[in-house]
Amino acid sequence: MKLKLHKNQMGGAPAAQWLRRVGYTFITDRSSGQDSFVRRLGGDFYPRFHLYVQEISGTDELFFNLHLDQKKASYEGQSRHSGEYEGELVEGEVARLQSYLQPASTVSTGASTGRTSAPAPASVNTEQDVLHTLQPHKLGERAPHQEKSWWQKLFS
């Protein structure tokens, strides 16, 4: 699935830095030498989200090409693998990535620094603010902890 972004939507950060912030790791394919980013879904290498970044020269636009690698290529010398380019998981990951983006209309770049500035905070309405009504949670009384000797630990 392809996602078109403007560089300002990433808070002015380079694509590699922004992707590391949202959980992706930079990798280089040993056989092709192509750079990409991955985010594993578990403790193993697969399944994982695999993302290629294409920067359009002369513009501030980026294209992310995202798919889900289900497993490593089955046959030696082959680059084909079980990848999903569409589906619920891929769409969910695109939605997750978009939740980290800043809206393009609210981002303004400084001419000299290249940094972004966030929109001005709205005035706080105390009638709608519920945080001032929260009270700290009181913990129940606990019996004091008595440390056992090594001899008592041995037979308990």
Image (cartoon, grey):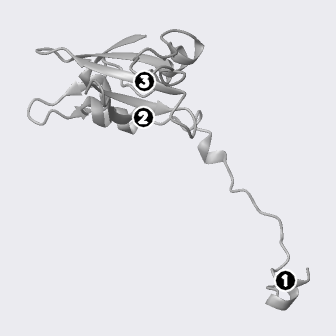
Toward the left, the furthest residue is: 112
Of label 3 and label 2, which has the lower sequence position?
Answer: 2
Quadrant location of the N terminus?
Answer: top left
Callout 3, which amino acid?
His
Mark 3 and mark 2: Cα distance apart in space: 13 Å
Q: Residue tagged by mark 3? A: 50
The residue nearer to you, when weighing 19 against 71, is: 71
Quadrant location of the C terminus?
Answer: bottom right
The residue nearer to you, when weighing 40 against 135, is: 40
Q: Is residue 149 among what the camera can see?
A: no
Q: Quadrant of residue 44?
A: top right
Callout 1, which amino acid?
Lys
Of label 2 and label 1, which has the lower sequence position?
Answer: 2
Callout 2, which amino acid?
Val
Q: Are marks 1 and 3 in contact (CB under 8 Å)?
A: no
Q: Residue tagged by mark 1? A: 153
Label 2 packing within 10 angstroms: few (<14), some (14-19), many (20+): few
Q: Is residue 117 among what the camera can see?
A: yes
Q: Quadrant of residue 29?
A: top left
**What is the tally of numbered marks visible in this picture?**
3
Q: Residue tagged by mark 2? A: 22
Q: Nearer the viewer, mark 2 or mark 1?
A: 1
Instruction: Report helix, strand or loop for mark 2.
Output: loop
Mark 2 and mark 1: Cα distance apart in space: 46 Å
Instruction: Report helix, strand or loop for mark 1.
Output: helix
The residue nearer to you, when weighing 8 against 34, is: 34
